[in-house]
């Protein structure tokens, strides 16, 4: 049984299946669209998602998932699926619904973390690049723990080192977790760290 959660409200609203979340977006988030398909009331299996027109003018969504991803980016209607966040970060499997809600609401970006730690934009950009490249090569999901370790690695490489505990604290991770991902990143990306 799938569980969808819409976080665009004061209190998150849960749905048991794709039909529930579909009817929620076409009725409760109707203002996100400039046009709906003629048969949108027929249900999720019968509707042609290519006929949805977002307020921004985008159309041609192949599936409900693509429509939800677009609403998240364009209209800030964040939808969580039990197997992951429906957005560019990919899937976070096997964690509780409460943790999903916390991640979706309190996620911190590398740029914001770098700012808190007093690191430059160049270090933040390099850390972001490291995180993306590592996740692509290692075929793992990008999480705040990977971002924390990437920022730690970038700070060392660019000669403005922060401690593992500082990186962990900003991303609300544990120091051993940051250490584990740090080792994985330097190994996967062949980064020479001066000891």
Image: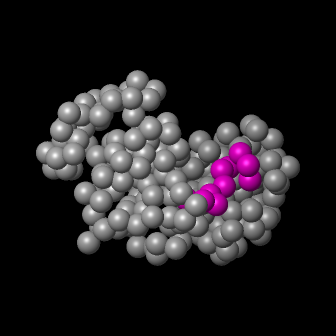
Q: Is residue 161 left or right of residue 84?
A: right
Residue found 18% across the figure and 38% down from its top:
39
The reply to whether residue 173 is visible in this rendering is yes
Q: Is residue 143 above or below residue 55?
A: below
Residue 30's spot in the image, x, y percent? 40, 41
| Most foreground residue, 154 or 28 | 28
Quarter of the image with the C terminus is: bottom right
Residue found 62% across the figure and 45% down from its top:
128
Q: Is residue 160 left or right of residue 100?
A: right
Helix, strand or loop for the magenta stretch, by majority:
helix
| Most foreground residue, 164 or 113 | 113
Residue found 62% across the figure and 72% down from its top:
177
Magenta stretch bounds: 104-113
- Give the quarter of the image for residue 16: bottom left
| Most foreground residue, 184 or 20 | 20
Residue 61's spot in the image, x, y percent? 29, 35
Residue 65's spot in the image, x, y percent? 32, 48
Residue 146's spot in the image, x, y percent? 58, 59
- Give the quarter of the image for residue 164: bottom right
Q: How many marks?
A: 0
Quarter of the image with the N terminus is: bottom left
The reply to whether residue 157 is visible in this rendering is no
| Most foreground residue, 141 or 87 | 87
């Amino acid at each position: 049984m799938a569980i969808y959660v819409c976080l665009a409200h004061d209190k998150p609203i849960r749905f048991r299946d794709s039909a529930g979340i579909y009817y929620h977006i076409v009725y409760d988030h109707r203002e996100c669209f400039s046009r709906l398909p003629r048969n949108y009331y027929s249900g999720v299996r019968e509707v042609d998602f290519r006929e949805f027109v977002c307020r921004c003018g985008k159309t041609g969504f192949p599936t409900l998932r693509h429509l939800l991803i677009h609403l998240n980016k364009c209209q800030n209607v964040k939808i969580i699926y039990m197997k992951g966040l429906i957005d560019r970060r990919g899937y976070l499997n096997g964690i509780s619904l409460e943790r999903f809600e916390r991640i979706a609401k309190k996620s911190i970006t590398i740029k914001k973390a770098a700012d808190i730690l007093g690191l430059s934009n160049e270090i933040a950009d390099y850390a972001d690049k490291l995180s993306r490249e590592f996740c692509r090569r290692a075929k793992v999901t990008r999480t705040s723990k990977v971002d924390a370790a990437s920022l730690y690695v970038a700070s060392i490489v660019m000669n403005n080192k922060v401690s593992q505990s500082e990186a962990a604290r900003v991303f609300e991770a544990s120091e051993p977790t940051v250490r584990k991902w740090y080792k994985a990143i330097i190994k996967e990306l062949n980064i020479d760290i001066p000891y």
